[in-house]
Each structure stands twice: as structure tokens, then as C-alpha cells.
Image (cartoon, grey):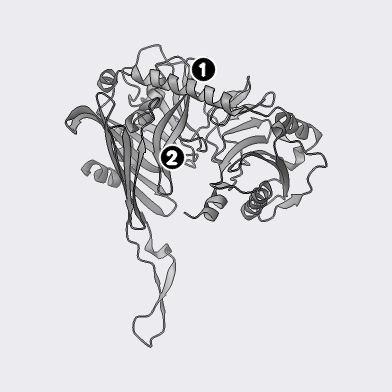
Amino acid sequence: MNNQRHRIIALTLVLVAVATAVTPIDSAASAQVIRSPLDPPTESSTAPTTPAAPAAAVQERWFEPAYGLSFEPPEGAIEMQNTRSGSLVTFALPPDFRISVHLYDVGEPITLRDAARQTAEQFVSTSPSAVQLKPSDNPIKPAGRPSLHLGFAVPAEAGRPAWVAELVLMKLDPTHFVVFQADLNAASFGPHTKAVFNRLLRSVDVAALDAIDRARVQLVETADQWAAEIDFDDLWDRLPDRAWFRLIRDGEEVGVRRMAFGRGTQMGAPGYTLEILSYEIQSDTEINTKAEFFLSERRDEELWSIQTESQMLDAGSLPLVDVVPRKGEAPVPMPINATTHVMKQTGLRSGGEVTVIRDSAEHADQTTWPVPPVGYLSRIETELLAMLLVDERPVRMQAYAYHGNAEDHAIALRTETATQLDNGSWSVNTRATPTSGWRSYLFDDRGRLLQINLADGGALVPATLEQVRQLWADQLDGLEAR
């Protein structure tokens, strides 16, 4: 991807104007010990069918360890996650006031003014009726850093009330920007809401680099110690042979996922295997993915392969191109060929290095990185991290792991938090990179997984094979045959 396109994508703002539903966790479950965190749901404990954004009352200073960013959340705010905005965090204040914080990596140095210009252009392209407001005379500079203020008024349309957005761009370093964004109903906009946002901006602090480094070292060491104590034999004995999930987005069933656990031998070493098969519909495209992971018993070697096939569902909806059947004849509009697009990824960790090969019709590449000496997690460990953390005391840690997609990949610094709520249930939140959205796992008080809230607003809900068969009979045959 070229740098200019990377900039534009990195500064894209997705605005959230509607509150995300919150589904409470049932605290009335008995204290019976559950053998596996992936036990299928029963009628009395069926997980919610609509994606739920975890929420918690904010009681302390909010802190982002990767960049040392911290601030005081608004009094009485509820911390929301998985709100599709890709934010580091979003705070909800009743009745219809949201404050979100976004971190953007623009890839190469650009000026604050250019970043603000691109942000304003993106806002207007998302909300064409938006009117840019005049900035305040004495704008606040969070943490004394270079910053610019933007304001927009969006008129009512399509049953949506008029609303106001204020954005404050703060430069962290030449390639990283933080955007503090307030969104609220225009009828509620006034001195009080302005004061709430200003208090948050005045409380912003950015730790010195040496303090950030010290904190990171401590958090990574925590992850390293935690990983060394994992009893994989015990975990594999407790896990089912297979676990099924329904994929739900916008209240609709859009896919199914199967996880299969086993043991095997690779590279002459015994170890653990995990296979993930999934089928998903995204807009007018169906996506099939097969992922296979292996981790040696000593945790020093691993293999994985991932193949994703995507194809448009309806050729009639494809873009048309003019095709000339014979020389001299008039062009005939015909749909672009709906061939299957295949992407493959193969990874190997051995001898202190991680090597990844990516292959698709567009390009192929091979990249090798040294394995960080402390705090590295395998692909299997990152997939199962949440259910392993539930058995521990509340924890915050950071770890290194491979993270990649079709556009970019690297050994990235992950952030993990596990919190036990007052009713005994657990919330585990994980972020694959410092600029990724959060993925949240909800467990009941017996450590049983209820729901996985994805960063894009979708949700994976544990299901029985019978439930999946009723919803996806045709696709199930394909999954079982693979």
C-alpha cells in the first residue's frame, strides 16, 4: 500500500451516534464448577443473540500503556468497548453524549495541519451535510502538546436527530496522533457538555519515554511469567474436541465458526494442535477460512497455515465492464468474472526466528523477524489467551506476538486485561496492536465463555451443533468435510 493511501485510511473516523446495547451477565448461576470454559450453552444459560458492548463504571484514571497516554474520565461515565469506531476507548454519558479516544499511526511524518485537513475531509465525506464550526478562541492543548480543534454540526436527517461533534487532534510524535472526539445530540450541546469535555482534555498526560519503557518491561515480564506457568496438558484435557460459534452482526446470523483441539507431532516434536474453520457473509461476499496451528510442548517451536477464500454471492451485482466480442462490433456490458480470491499465509517459529510467507493473486512475500527474548506468545496462546486469564487473578499485561492481515504484518505489542466483576463474572479485553480495536470476552462466574465481542461490532456466541445445523445446514456440510 502506498503511503498516501495509508495516511487516508489511518485518519478515517467512524462516528458512533447510537448507543450500543448492553447485555447484563446473569449472576444467579450456581457455584458448580464447569469442567471446560467452552462447554456448550444450555437453555437456561444461552448467551445473548445480539452483540453486547461490555460496559463498566469508570472509577480511576484511564491509562494506555503502549504510548503512556492517560487522563481522567468524565464523572459518572460508562466505559464502552467494541463500538465499531476502532477507538482506544469510548465513554458514554447519559442521555446521548459520547467521548471517544482514537490513536492513529500515519506511517510517515506529516504536519498537524495536514492531519487536521485530512480528518475534516474524511468527516465531511462520511457526513456530507456536516457544517464545519469556527474553533474556540482559546483552545486547550492537551498535555501541552501541539494540537488543533475541529467542530462540526450535522443537521437532522433520516430520522436521526441533529448532532454536534468536536474533535481535538494531539500530536504524540511525528507519525502518531491522538484524536479526542465528543459526539452529542445538538439539543444537549451547551456550556455543561463543553465543560465536561474540557475537563478531560485538561487532565491529559503523556508519560516520558523512559517511564513508558519501564512500564512496558514490567508488563511484558508479567506476561512471560504467566505463560511459563500455563499447564497445556490440563487445558487440553478440559477442552472439548470441538467447539461451535455463531457469528452475529447487526442482530443477524452472518456466519459460523468451528474450533477443534488435538495433539500431534511436527518437526519431530510432540505438541498441541488447533484448527479453526469459519464461514462468513460480509455484505455481498462469502468468506471461507481454514486455519491450522501447532505448538510444541516446550513452546519453542510452532507452525501455522491460514487459507481464506472469498467470492461474491451474486454475479448480477458485480460491476460491469465493456467487452467487445468481435472486432468492429459494439461493446457489450458484462459483469466482471466472479472468480474465487484466495489468500494464503504460512508461518514458522524455530531457532529464535519467525518466518511468514503470504501469497495471493496480487503479490507474494516472505518476512523473517527475530523472536523477542521475553514475553513472546504463540498463535495458539493468543487464540486461547482469554480463557486462560480467567483462572488467574485480575491482571494487566503486554506481550509480543505475530499479527498480520492482507495489508500489513509484524511482531506487535499486545495488551491484555482481565477483570473479575462484583458478581464473579469476568471480562477479558485484548488488543492485538497499540492501534487495533479491542476484542472482549465475557465469562460467567464459573469461567464459562458467554460471548466474544469483536472489534468491528460483531459477536461470536458459543453454540451447540444442533443450533448451528438449524442455521447453516448447507455450510455445515462443507465445514465438516474440510
Q: In the image, 322: left or right of 100?
A: left
Up the image or down, 336 lies above or below 221; here it is below
- Is residue 308 at all visible to an observer of this figure? no
Local crowd size for mark 1, using a 10 Å CA cut-off: few (<14), some (14–19), many (≥20): few
Up the image or down, 480 lies above or below 395; here it is below
Kindly identify the amino acid type of the residue bearing the numbered disc 2. Answer: Ile
Could you say which quadrant of the image residue 234 lies in? top left
Residue at disc 1, secondary structure: loop
Expressed as whole percent of the image width and height from the top left, the position of residue 106 reads: 56, 46
Q: Which residue is at 59% across, 38% downward?
A: 102
Up the image or down, 201 lies above or below 106; here it is above
| Residue found at the very far right of the displayed protein | 137
Q: How many marks can you see?
A: 2
Could you say which quadrant of the image residue 15 lies in? top right
Expressed as whole percent of the image width and height from the top left, the position of residue 300 reads: 28, 27
Tag 1 and tag 2, C-beta contact below 8 Å: no
Q: Which residue is at 69% across, 55% downward?
A: 129
Q: In the image, 215: left or right of 115?
A: left
Dot 1 or dot 2: first in sequence order is 2
Local crowd size for mark 2, using a 10 Å CA cut-off: few (<14), some (14–19), many (≥20): many
Residue at disc 2, secondary structure: strand
Q: Which mark is residue 330?
A: none
Kindly identify the amino acid type of the residue bearing the numbered disc 1. Answer: Leu
Query: Which mark lies nearer to you, 1 or 2?
Result: 1
Q: In the image, 334: left or right of 153?
A: left
Q: Which residue is at 76% across, 40% downward?
A: 187
Dot 2 corresponds to which residue? 248
Expressed as whole percent of the image width and height from the top left, the position of residue 293 reads: 28, 35
Dot 1 corresponds to which residue? 421
Q: In the image, 44: left or right of 193?
A: left
- Is residue 278 at all visible to an observer of this figure? yes
Viewer-nearest residue: 28 or 236: 236
